[in-house]
Image (cartoon, helix red, strand yellow):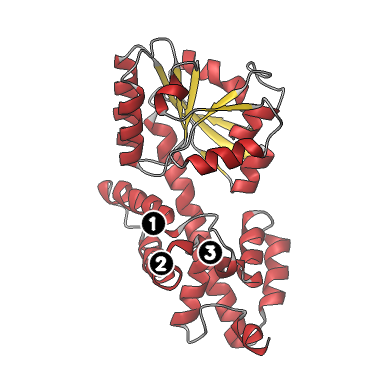
Amino acid sequence: MSRNLATKATHPSAGLPVIVYNRTFARTEAFAGSLPDGAVTIAKTIEDAVEPADIIWTSLSNDQTVIDVYEEALKQDVKGKIFVETSTILPETADKVAEMVEKQGAEFVTCPVFGAPATADAGTVIAVLAGKPSTVSKISPYLDGTISRKTIAMPSESPSKALLLKLHGNSFILSMISALSYGHTFAEKTGLGTSVLHEFITSMFPGPYAAYSERMLSGDYYTRDEPLFAVDLARKDLGHMLTLADAVGVDMKVLRVVDEHLKIVKKEMGEKGDLPGVYGAVRLESGLPFGNQEKEEEQD
């Protein structure tokens, strides 16, 4: 998203450098180096990032980190600034942060997005926007055409409502991964064949189903250097969704099954564990190797 805010002339602040900050400074340098000169400026501290900015976009790994970063950011004068929180966190965390921000005279909206990193780079994620109408109207021009292809504006003023949809949407993705994993394992063991099943999937369910199916069959789910949806983050989102579902008496059994498979992915792959690695876990349970390319690798 930062890339598109920095390079696309489709939003109100186009032409101004985007101030970027990451707790891992090397990532900030690498990101800045991938963009045209002058597109971004690098901040070395949270204070350096927040002080000169009018709109602050945050994307962080978990609820506690979100709270910690906002506590640091709000130590300075932020009156009149707008904070846009895009992290996948519990609704109650979003409400807590909103209260913190508004007490300091600033504005706050949540704007989690759906889409893989490549989708984010292309500016074609789906954004979910929630907050006070006056603030939502100020942020909307930065979304469709810049960082997103579609914005779902929540009817409620509560920032927490966007997180309800984000987490529930992620539960659909987790369930899809499970169905594909069982499907391809079944196809291999019965002799149906994974290639013909993939052809069916791409014809019947184009889009995310086809993309994840391709990642599974190509072996990308266990051979890439860095995960696209790291196993720990997947389990964090899954845990949040189970917490919300249990609170209202909905037993989402499929998510509990996925979590058990993600534990296997973590055991097999460690920090490189990726969400579609659930395919490898289902393969192991079914008497196949975790990696679907292992026989070919042994022959090489």
- Whole-percent x, y for residue 117 in the image: 60, 47
Foreground residue among 228 and 157? 228
Seen in the picture, residue 87 relative to 213 is either above or below; the reply is above
Q: Is residue 154 left or right of residue 202?
A: left
Q: Position of residue 59 (x, y in %)?
A: 46, 36
Q: Are marks 2 and 1 in contact (CB under 8 Å)?
A: yes
Q: Is residue 223 visible?
A: yes
- Residue 144 showing in the rendered view: no
Residue picked out by circle 2: 266
Q: Nearer the viewer, residue 133 or 283?
A: 283
CA–CA distance in space, label 2 to label 1: 10 Å
Q: Kindly identify which numbered label has been placed on residue 276.
A: 3
Amino acid under label 2?
Lys
Disc 1 designates what residue?
A: 235
Which amino acid is tagged 3? Answer: Pro
Q: Would you place residue 158 above or below residue 195 in this image?
A: above
Above-or-below relation of 175 to 190: above
Specify which label sits upstream in the sequence, 3 or 1: 1
Residue sitting nearer the eye, 33 or 299: 33
Where residue 213 appears, as percent x and y from the top left, is 63, 65
Which quarter of the figure has residue 151? Answer: top right
Which residue is at the far bottom?
299
Mark 2 or mark 1: name the one nearer the start of the chain: 1
Q: Secondary structure at mark 2?
A: helix
What type is the residue that disc 1 sits on?
Arg
Q: Nearer the viewer, mark 2 or mark 1?
A: 2
User: Quick one: label 2, few (<14), some, or many (20+) residues within 10 Å?
Assistant: many
- Given this view, does label 3 or label 2 mark the residue nearer the observer? 2
At x 40%, y 23%, the residue is: 47
Q: CA distance from mark 3 to mark 2?
A: 12 Å
Mark 1: secondary structure:
helix
- Secondary structure of the residue carrying tag 3 is helix
